[in-house]
Image (cartoon, rainbow, N blue to C red):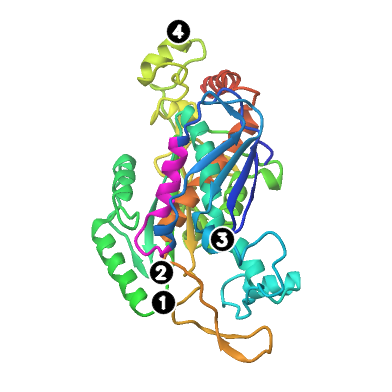
């Protein structure tokens, strides 16, 4: 997709993480506090390791913002790694003195990028690989996603997540009301809305820690209310489901992505897979209705100021012109395009490959059998990965949003977006 672009740089124990966002429109009110809140959410979650007590991530905005609003120029972000002071010799930028060379990491960990990267880059030191392959890089993604989230929020779109499985333990008591679902997840140690499952998940994590093992799991990200027409069926690289899958799969340790029913669609007959289409004759707003004026829309939404009623949250006619579904098995996407229902996407995270009781490996230097190397790590990071997943979903949706309604300023986008919503009504 070409709506937005970002680039990140930095190593796990280097001086800082850096990010550049290109394509964000001018005039968006940007809250640094809101970005830091997302960074704090990423650091929470039962089962996290010792580094979460070392780092308290804060973002520094270096460019692209003036007086609290975006300028339309590239936005530069930085997150300082507080732990760098303990790694200055190991991660020095300049060549070390001959007597100061740090010992190479030569025992690759199964399941990590160590060995594959050592072979790819022809290096005998896994430190050159693992520093960038580390999930520490996702802190910058969360900061970048928080900027995208603020763009979506301006247009009334929310993105949230919840954990539905850790190990083989599956949450079953999931609230149907999404506001309740989000609140319960935020108040859970493992971001799970099922209180009984939360207690059992904590016990499983404790048992895995005691055994020197790690656990994976599954989380779900929901974006709503979602207007019809984002994405494309025309080109393979603009299909929104493909873009979401790629973005989520790019998160370290994510091994599978499902949209809507996902794999379940292969097991059911078509009559139990596809979402039937209905039309509400009472709700749609006529293109010639007197309610088209901006003031009426603003009052109807209960919102004020520039964030006017571009969307009436929860009202079907504003997302798909009165067409609606009683089910959402497609996860809000058909043929690569949003259909007016909420986007619902799940991601499966494998157990973290660093184990305190390590698996077998081979020393890269002399090829003798050894135990794999150990780096400071978590027992599980599924709750944190869910927050990273939110950031990536927010980024993809915001990019599709810019591609569809893009302009040089937010006010320009508001006009185009409102016109699109009204045009959906028959």
- Residue tagged 2: 379
Alpha carbon of mark 2 to alpha carbon of mark 1: how far? 7 Å
Residue 300, percent across and down?
Answer: 37, 17
Q: Which badge, 2 or 1, comes first in the chain's sequence?
A: 1
Q: Nearer the viewer, mark 2 or mark 3?
A: 3
Q: Label 1: state its secondary structure.
A: loop
- Tell me, yes or no, if residue 230 can be seen here: no
The answer to whether the residue labelled 2 contacts the one labelled 1, judged by CB atoms less than 8 Å apart, is: yes
Element on which disc 4 rests: helix
In this view, 137 is above or below 29: below
Residue at mark 4: 290
Picture coordinates of residue 423 (x, y %)?
56, 21
Give above or below for 409 relative to 234.
above
User: How packed is label 2: few (under 14 Cα within 10 Å), some, or many (20 or more)?
Assistant: many
Region rendered in magenta: 33-50
Q: Which mark is residue 213?
A: 1
Closer to the chain start, of discs 3 and 4, is 3
Name which residue lies at 56% across and 60% down: 13
**Which mark is first along the chain, 3 or 1?**
3
Whether residue 409 is in magenta: the answer is no
| Label 1 crowd (10 A; few <14 / some 14-19 / many >=20) | many
What is the x, y in percent for residue 279? 44, 30
User: In the image, 96: left or right of 134?
Assistant: right
Q: Is residue 352 left or right of residue 185?
A: right
Q: Could you tell me how far apart the alpha carbons at marks 1 and 4 are, in whole angstroms?
A: 64 Å
The CA distance from mark 2 to mark 3 is 20 Å
């Amino acid at each position: 997709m070409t709506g937005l672009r970002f680039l990140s740089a930095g190593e796990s124990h280097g001086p800082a993480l850096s990010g550049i966002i290109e394509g964000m429109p001018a005039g968006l009110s940007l809250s640094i506090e809101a970005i830091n809140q997302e960074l704090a959410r990423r650091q929470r979650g039962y089962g996290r390791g010792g580094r979460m007590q070392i780092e308290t991530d804060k973002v520094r905005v270096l460019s692209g913002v003036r007086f609290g609003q975006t300028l339309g120029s590239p936005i530069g972000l930085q997150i300082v790694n507080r732990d760098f002071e303990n790694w200055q010799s190991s991660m020095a930028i300049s060549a070390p003195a001959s007597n100061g060379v740090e010992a190479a990491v030569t025992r690759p960990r199964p399941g990590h990028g160590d060995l594959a990267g050592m072979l790819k880059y022809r290096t005998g030191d896994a430190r050159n690989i693992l520093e960038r392959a580390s999930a520490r890089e996702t802190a910058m993604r969360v900061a970048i996603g928080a900027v995208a989230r603020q763009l979506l929020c301006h247009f009334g779109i929310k993105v949230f997540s919840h954990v539905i499985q850790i190990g083989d333990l599956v949450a079953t008591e999931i609230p149907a009301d999404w506001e309740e679902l989000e609140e319960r997840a935020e108040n859970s140690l493992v971001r799970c809305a099922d209180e009984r499952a939360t207690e059992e998940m904590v016990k499983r994590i404790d048992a895995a820690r005691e055994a020197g093992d790690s656990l994976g799991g599954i989380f779900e990200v929901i974006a709503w209310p979602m207007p019809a027409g984002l994405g494309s069926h025309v080109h393979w690289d603009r299909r929104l489901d493909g873009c979401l899958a790629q973005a989520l799969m790019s998160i370290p340790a994510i091994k599978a992505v499902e949209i809507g029913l996902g794999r379940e669609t292969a097991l059911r007959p078509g009559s139990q897979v596809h979402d039937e289409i209905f039309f509400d004759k009472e709700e749609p707003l006529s293109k010639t209705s007197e309610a088209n004026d901006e003031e009426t829309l603003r009052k109807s939404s209960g919102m004020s100021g520039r964030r006017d009623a571009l969307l009436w949250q929860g009202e079907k006619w504003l997302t798909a012109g009165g067409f609606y579904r009683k089910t959402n098995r497609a996860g809000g996407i058909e043929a690569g395009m949003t259909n007016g229902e909420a986007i619902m996407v799940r991601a499966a995270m494998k157990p973290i490959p660093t184990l305190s009781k390590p698996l077998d490996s081979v020393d890269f230097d002399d090829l003798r059998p050894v135990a794999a190397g150990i780096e400071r790590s978590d027992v599980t990071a599924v709750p944190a990965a869910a927050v990273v997943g939110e950031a990536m979903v927010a980024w993809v949706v915001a990019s599709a949003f810019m591609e569809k309604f893009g302009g040089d300023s937010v006010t320009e986008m508001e006009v185009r977006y409102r016109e699109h919503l009204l045009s959906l009504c028959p």
